[in-house]
Amino acid sequence: MFGVRSIFALYAIGHRVGLAMGLLAVAVAVSAVTGTTSLPLPWLSEGSLDLSLDHLLAVALLAAHATLLTGELSSREESSVRSWWWADCLGMTVLLCGPVFLAFTGDAGLLQNTLLYLVFFFLISLVIGPETAYPTVIFLIVVQTMVVALVPDRGLIPVFWDPDPRIIAALFLLATVAFLVARRPVKTSTRLRITA
């Protein structure tokens, strides 16, 4: 019989919690120091558009979330008798604590971008699987920064949304629902089968 301590140790080792927490610590620390600093993207320099460093750090946090859910034990957990959904929920919540703290101190960019990228990741994972969902999210971010010149209002492009509590609340709900729907397929590296 496993004790609580051994269950947490098993989860931590099998899901590379150390790596995920390291990414969290670096992202939160760098965001606290330089989060609103603009990234030097040449195609954005002509207009008054800019992307903060929080966008890049949110990609690192997305990697931390993906690391937790795609650990070596993930597919085995889903085929076992014991349910691990509570541990996955706890892990995802812990990874959001740093960005939530920063949001309360006035820098909500990291939280909003992380939630946005999680929504993208979970929904894309359902269609093409988690292995290709992460690079696809990065590709979508780059594409959004490039097409902003073609749209009349930058508010139409999610990457350029200013941090707003209403947007964060909506993204949190979307990310929660997407996580609940995609958790098992992400952990087992399966995707929806679309038949024609």
Image: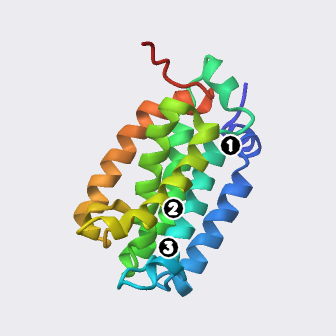
Residue 164 visible in the current orientation: no
Residue 189 is situated, as x and y percent measured from the top left of the image, at 62, 29
Q: Residues within 10 Å of mark 3 (few under 14, many from 20)?
A: many
Tell me: residue 32, above or below residue 139: below
* Residue sitting at x 69%, y 40%: 11
Colouring mode (rainbow / by chain / secondary structure / one colour): rainbow
Nearer the viewer's eye, disc 3 or disc 1? 3
Specify the label residue 8 is tagged with: 1
Residue 187 is situated, as x and y percent measured from the top left of the image, at 60, 32
Tell me: residue 100, above or below residue 84: below
Tell me: residue 94, above or below residue 69: below
* Residue sitting at x 41%, y 72%: 109
Q: Nearer the viewer, residue 185 or 76?
A: 185
Please give left or right for residue 68 compared with residue 94 in the image. right
Looking at marks 2 and 1 on the same chain, the residue that comes earlier in the sequence is marked by 1
Which residue in the protein does label 3 denote?
A: 54
Residue 6 is situated, as x and y percent measured from the top left of the image, at 74, 39
Amino acid type, mark 1:
Phe
Looking at marks 3 and 1 on the same chain, the residue that comes earlier in the sequence is marked by 1
Looking at marks 2 and 3 on the same chain, the residue that comes earlier in the sequence is marked by 3
Please give left or right for residue 73 compared with residue 175 in the image. right
Q: Residues within 10 Å of mark 2 (few under 14, many from 20)?
A: few
What kind of element bears circle 2? helix
Residue 159 is situated, as x and y percent measured from the top left of the image, at 39, 64
* Label pair 2/1, CB-CB below 8 angstroms: no
Structural distance between the alpha carbons of marks 3 and 1: 30 Å
Q: For the N terminus, which image quadrant?
A: top right
* Residue sitting at x 50%, y 86%: 37
What kind of element bears circle 3? helix
Amino acid type, mark 2:
Val
Nearer the viewer's eye, disc 2 or disc 3? 2
Specify the label residue 28 is tagged with: none
